[in-house]
Amino acid sequence: MVKLIGLRGLVRQWVDAIEVHDRKVAKLLCRMIPASCPFERDIKFFKRILFHIPPLCQLNPLYEQAIGLRLKALSYLADECGEDVALYC
């Protein structure tokens, strides 16, 4: 049975298949993909929190693939290159 995969599925497979074998590319990926969602905010007024904006990154259909790619880059830098990855955490 042939399974039809949509464009989103193909992009997910393509991102999952990316291998990191270059130190410069790994460092670039670690700098470009944030460790946590950058959109989470507390809206304050006179030191009182009016409301909280939750992290919305999980709504991105490629969020898990981006985090996985960042993990691959961190693993490459730590395991293969022997670098301290605390800078990127």
Image (cartoon, helix red, strand yellow):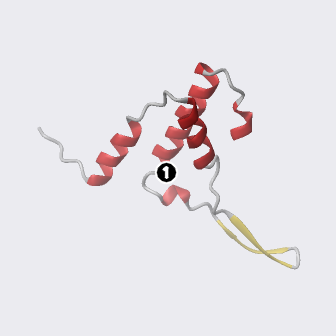
Q: In which quarter of the image is residue 61?
A: bottom left
Q: Do we see residue 83 in this rendering?
A: yes
Residue 20 vs 70, above or below: the answer is above
Is 18 on the left-hand or right-hand side of 44? left
**Crowd tier of the residue under label 1, counting other residues whose Cα lies within 10 Å: few below 14, some 14–19, many 20 or above:** some
Image quarter hosting the C terminus: top right
In the picture as drawn, the residue positioned furthest to the front comes out as 24
Instruction: Reply above or below: 41 against 19.
Output: below
80 left or right, relative to 16: right
Residue nearest the viewer, comparing 69 with 81 = 81
Q: Where is residue 47 in the image (x, y as percent from the top left)?
A: 88, 74
Front residue of this view, candidates 1 and 62: 62
Name the image quarter holding the N terminus. Answer: top left
Identify the secondary structure beneath mark 1. helix
Where residue 23 appears, as percent x and y from the top left, is: 57, 30
Residue labelled with disc 1: 63
In the displayed image of the protein, which residue is found farthest to the bottom?
45
Q: What residue type is labelled 1?
A: Tyr
Residue drawn 69% across the image and 32% down it: 85
Q: Where is residue 5 in the image (x, y as percent from the top left)?
A: 23, 48
